[in-house]
Amino acid sequence: QKPVLEINDLRLVFPVYGGEISALNNVSLQVNAGEIVGVVGESGSGKSVTAMMSMRLLPQDSFAIKAGELRLLGTDVINASDKQMRQLRGARVAMIFQEPMNALNPTRKIGRQMCEVIRLHQHLTRQQAYQKAIGLLQEMQIGDAEQVMGRYPFELSGGMRQRVLIAMAFSCEPELIIADEPTTALDVTVQRQVLRLLRRKAKSSGTAVLFITHDMAVVSQLCDRVYVMYAGHVIESGKTAEVIGQPAHPYSIGLLQAAPENGEPRSLLKAIPGTVPNLAKLPAGCAFRGRCAQGDEQCAQSPKLMPLDGHAQQLVSCWHPQRIPTLTMQE
Ligand code: ATP
Ligand code: MG
């Protein structure tokens, strides 16, 4: 399997007055061609930093790489030139952000924006670009695609804007799409529709997706594999069915119990007591131990990501991996 994104043992800090914020601590993560991979975790776990760094979109002087490597479609992102990064972005790798209003130009009609993006990276006539945009919007089941092309962003619902952005992300036929919580603002029913279309389009076009979310229910619906992040660490990873069916890390179990059921969102803090530790002074050992019911003296030592017994692909970073009866998420 060919990796499109490969992160090995990456340590990234944000220098701040009097110290540094350890945003990514030895993160390893891989996305293979055509694969849909989720990154899930609470606020502040390092999901967006991972996504932004993969495209090298973090402000140049704001961060420092302390160790590790990051390859995007074979390009060494840490050492690549700005020109090399520009050639990757947009054409071979596309990004979808959370708030579609910010990504669309409010003063220009949808059709014009889509055709511009399409023609920027592909040698197509105006007419060909227009036809391509219509086709993509139809695949996103947006209703009357021609009518939508003639609308301004503010004239569309949030769900429609999100479909437009997904269509635009696919329009350059990228090898990888990085999506950072693109459906969080949508209601659950619309979110499910949009995710179903995203998955179908990604699979039919062979495009890999790195999908960032705080919601295990989203992972369950969309992703082939998943990485669970906590305080800048990957604490569990594996096939979605494995991690969701038999989560081994106490934090993954907590996240699953916090996932909305029947469309009824429950407060994360109710399910996992306590708060994320201060990343400016992370103590040695397991970062979750202050909130963990299983924590003991052993947890003062840093656990390593290890294969779970009997699971070739499921890795867990915990001294006391749990064995709970198989969970089933409500679909
Ligand atoms: P959310 O679910 O809220 O989006 P997240 O998992 O995406 O959370 P990140 O945005 O990746 O979290 O942030 C990880 C940590 O890095 C946080 O503690 C954040 O405050 C810190 N951080 C991010 N960007 C910077 C920056 N430019 N300077 C200093 N600290 C930063
Ligand atoms: Mg984020």
Image (tube, helix red, strand yellow):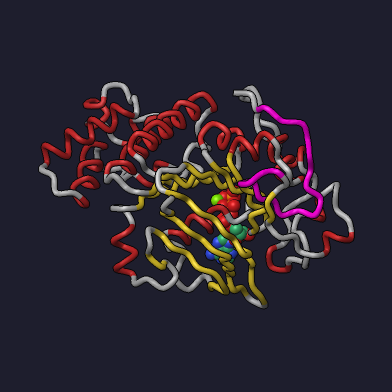
In the rendering, at what x and y percent does residue 298 appear? 86, 60
Q: Say if residue 255 shows up in the picture.
A: yes
Q: Say if residue 161 shows up in the picture.
A: no
The residue furthest right is 297
In the rendering, at what x and y percent does residue 66 appear? 57, 74
Magenta segment, principal secondary structure?
A: loop
Say which quarter of the image contains residue 67.
Answer: bottom right
* Residue name at image x 45 percent, y 28 percent: 196
Image quadrant, ligand 1: bottom right
Front residue of 265 and 38: 38
Span shown in magenta: 310-328
* Residue name at image x 34 percent, y 64 percent: 85
* For residue 257, side relative to residue 11 (left or right): right
Front residue of 304 and 252: 304
Verify whether residue 318 appears in magenta. yes
Verify whether residue 90 appears in magenta. no
In the rendering, at what x and y percent does residue 61 appear? 48, 73
